Image: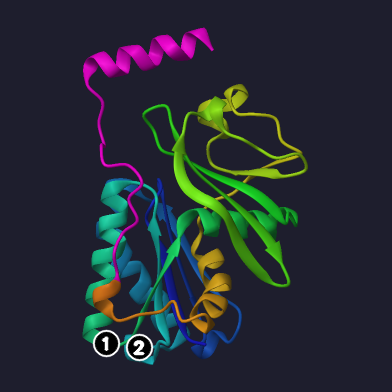
Amino acid sequence: MNLLAFDTSTDILSIAVVGGALGAVPREYSGPGGARASSALIPALQDLLAQAGLRLADLDAIVFGRGPGSFTGLRTACSVAQGLAFGAAVPVLAVDTLLAVAEDARERAGVQQVVAVLDARMDQVYCACYTHDAGQWRQQGETRLSAPQALDVPAGWALAGNAFTAYGARLPAAAQRVEAMPVAAALLRLAPMLMAAGQGGPAASARPLYIRDKVAQTTAERAAARAAALTT
């Protein structure tokens, strides 16, 4: 399959292309995310497509991380995916970023039962639980927000994501901790299974997954969060 994938949901911009002259071996790009992702994304993906000898119209799908994650990053990913897909008349495939974290952890450490977490700032994490069986991931329960210390990690499960530096000992014990991210290479590995399940769609279906409506705390809320952190 000819696929372009990208994720802008975190502080890292991740892009990958597979197919064309590259065959089954993906070509990847990683750079600063955040505010800089919107200006770097299109030039970087155009360069990767050129290396693969692919035009946008040659793609079987444009794959992107739909969230949860940075509000600005998710809007960037959705708008770029939608615009490129409209222009090239190719489908989009929206992938949950926490599922991509679980897949990255599996690739890195071989784990099959994962509590995936991403730093949600504001003293919280995004989290979801996944099991991998017979070549497929299955989500257990809902995607949600949690205080780091309130996470539930079942016995024998791995805790994977990017929240260890921020929350450290406040995260619960786990059989294994794996630093993992929703990288574009993980999106590419997930794409064939998700497309076979009919999850691809037209450009207009490129929408973000927001778990939290509020993106900033008041001064009083920030002070209360700091006080709570000191007492835990």
- Give the side of residue 58 with respect to residue 98, left or right: left
Please state which of residues 174 and 78 is positioned toward the viewer in this rendering. Answer: 174
What residue sits 41% from the left and 79% below the top? 200
The residue identified by callout 1 is: 88
What amino acid type should be assigned to the residue bearing mark 1? Ala
**Is 83 situated above or below 23?**
above
The residue identified by callout 2 is: 55
Please state which of residues 37 and 85 is positioned toward the viewer in this rendering. Answer: 85
Label 2 Cα crowd, 10 Å radius (few <14 / some 14-19 / many 20+) = few
- Viewer-nearest of labels 2 and 1? 1
Please state which of residues 97 and 5 is positioned toward the viewer in this rendering. Answer: 97
What residue sits 39% from the left and 14% below the top? 226
- Give the side of residue 130 with respect to residue 71, left or right: right
Q: Helix or strand or loop: what does disc 1 sit on?
A: helix
Quarter of the figure with residue 40 = bottom left
* Pointer 2 or 1: first along the chain: 2
What residue sits 35% from the left and 80% below the top? 201
- Give the side of residue 155 with respect to residue 226, left or right: right
User: Is 219 in the magenta?
Assistant: yes
Tag 2–tag 1 contact (CB < 8 Å): yes
**Is 103 situated above or below 141?**
below
Q: Helix or strand or loop: what does disc 2 sit on?
A: loop
Range of the magenta residues?
Answer: 206-232
Q: How many marks?
A: 2
- In x, y percent, where is residue 186? 56, 64
User: Is 215 in the magenta?
Assistant: yes
- Give the side of residue 70 with respect to residue 145, left or right: left
- In x, y percent, where is residue 83? 22, 75
